[in-house]
Image (cartoon, helix red, strand yellow):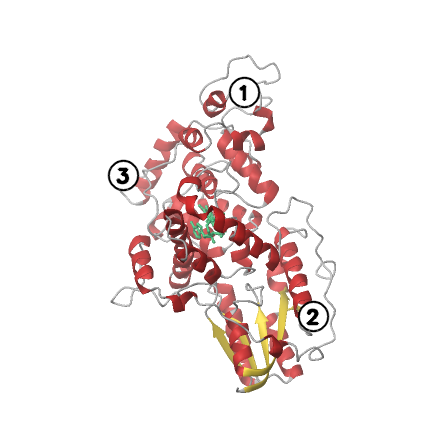
Amino acid sequence: MTNDLSLVWLRRDLRLEDNTAISKACAESRRVVVAFVFDVKILQKLNSKSDRRVDFIYDSIIELDQQLRNLGSRLIVLIGDPAVEIPNLANEMNATAVYFNEDYEPYAKLRDKKVCERLKIDKTESFASKDHVIFAPSEICKSDGNPYKMFTPYKNFWLKKLTSTDYKLYDFDAKKLSLALDIGPPSAMPSLKQLQFQPSTLAFTPKPGRRAALASLKKWSKHLSTYHTTRNFPADASGTSGLSVHLRFGTISIRECIRIAMADPSLGAKVWLSELIWRDFYHMILFRFPHVVNGAFKEDYDNIKWPGKDSDFAAWREGRTGYPIIDAGMRQLNQTGWMHNRLRMITASFLVKDLLIDWKRGESYFAEKLLDFDLAANNGGWQWCASTGCDSQPYFRIFNPVLQSQKFDPDCVFIKKWLPELKSLSAKEIHLLPIARPKPTAVDFKFGKTYPKAIVLHSAQKLRAIQIFKQAIKLVPSI
Ligand SMILES: Cc1cc2nc3c(=O)[nH]c(=O)nc-3n(C[C@H](O)[C@H](O)[C@H](O)COP(=O)(O)OP(=O)(O)OC[C@H]3O[C@@H](n4cnc5c(N)ncnc54)[C@H](O)[C@@H]3O)c2cc1C
């Protein structure tokens, strides 16, 4: 026991259980206080004053506060710049140490460095732990110390290195948390209004908070074994875990997910584990190649002058491109803040390779709308689809949105849910809408009015896209 009183600063790890920082703080201290700071620098950057992610965090920390109160403590919630608030709070409490979990995003790295520098001046110790990933960016690298750029060798090494210690449960001593009720400022939970936000009125799935996260994980463990067969079909609501938001904000731990996957010998569990490894992989890429935040991983592609039109970008955003599978996906995103992975891939590919619009504009739109927005996964996903990333889809392999629609939503169950105006058409007619006018049998359907005609022709745009990529890597001269 080294510390009389320690502070744990929660950020994207909104839970007490299986939380490395809390576990370590409890093991090394007599008393532990837990705090969360609404970071005004992040809040000010959000485009809207009504944001489902702020609601999610807010509702999750209310639950966390209640959990701490049940233990005889409370969550200290502050609003401000953490580089000021955390050292001030540590000073005020006479804490000798601050514990937190590592965050690999560029902004977070800089912020944490500032906090630690201030703490050092104040002679307060700081301890950062790995928690958000199984292997930190520096733990998986080639024999020469360089990072992997291809997913498959990364994954093989990741699997070879994994032992049960890597996904062990980080327990905590609740007694240590119960001795701290009167410590710190006598602050009540701030209201959303104090944060200058209003509750979002949009559909709110999945539910926030630790309890909801655990219920989702439990439910998911019953479907996991068939993941390899269900994961690509957006109409199947149980086809994927729906855990991304909880993983993003840490209401569930990555180790809890890995434990479920490792305990299940099925092929579905193996394939799901592979998706969780993609998550580690993209965190590593972001950390080791921070230039991806502002441009292409393959820098040659930064020179592309994308010729796409603003009006087509608006049609894509609003789900009125005339390609039903694209429009259904975009409406799901706009209305729920979540989009199925298959649709993220098809809509991203369509923006870049059919509408010829810069992938960074799509990346920003997803960042604004996705409840599970995660810089590493979103950037990685976009660069993969745009063929500008490490180990990405080659530029000449372009998704055909009509074939994708026929393959992954054969009966148009998903499309009809989000585009009810197409209900009177047959599945065959819906898939072919971008290339074939439907028979005028449905009285209530007026092609071009009830639903827009396709804004581009895939077969022609695909050739233009390939030409653009070839010019960028100088396979053909630019015109
Ligand atoms: C263009 C694009 C943008 C994306 N943006 C994000 C994002 O901002 N945040 C995000 O969490 N995921 C993102 N993804 C990855 C993936 O689409 C989502 O993680 C997944 O759809 C979430 O649903 P789920 O929890 O049911 O996933 P499941 O299929 O159940 O997968 C389990 C978990 O594995 C992780 N995961 C799965 N696929 C990937 C992947 N390709 N890359 C990294 N992690 C993955 C997620 O944490 C996910 O919750 C993006 C993918 C693309 C193609």
Looking at numbered disc 1 in the image, what kind of residue is underneath it? Leu
Q: Secondary structure at mark 1?
A: loop
Q: Which one is closest to the eye, mark 1 or mark 2?
A: 2
Which residue occupies the foreground of this view, 134 or 367?
134
Which badge, 3 or 1, comes first in the chain's sequence?
A: 1
Q: Position of residue 457 (x, y in %)?
A: 43, 26
Q: Which one is closest to the eye, mark 3 or mark 1?
A: 1
State the residue at coordinates (69%, 80%). 183
**How dense is the environment of label 3, judged by Cα within 10 Å: few (below 14), some, or many (20 and up)?**
few
As displayed, is residue 233 above or below residue 448? below
Q: Quadrant of residue 76?
A: bottom right
As displayed, is residue 69 above or below residue 125? above
Residue placed under numbered mark 2 in the picture: 69
Residue placed under numbered mark 3 in the picture: 476
Q: Is mark 1 within 8 Å of ligand 1?
A: no
Q: Position of residue 151 (x, y in %)?
A: 33, 53
**How dense is the environment of label 1, judged by Cα within 10 Å: few (below 14), some, or many (20 and up)?**
many
As displayed, is residue 170 above or below residue 347? below
State the residue at coordinates (52%, 37%). 329
State the residue at coordinates (52%, 80%). 27
Looking at the rendered structure, which numbered label has been put on residue 233? none
Which badge, 2 or 3, comes first in the chain's sequence?
A: 2
Q: Which one is closest to the eye, mark 2 or mark 3?
A: 2
Q: Is mark 3 within 8 Å of ligand 1?
A: no
State the separation of the CA atoms marked 2 and 3.
66 Å
Q: Position of residue 287 (x, y in %)?
A: 41, 63
Residue placed under numbered mark 1 in the picture: 425
Q: Position of residue 382 (x, y in %)?
A: 43, 47
Looking at numbered disc 3 in the image, what kind of residue is underneath it? Val
Dots 1 and 2: beta carbons under 8 Å? no
State the residue at coordinates (49%, 32%). 325
Which residue occupies the foreground of this view, 242 or 95?
242
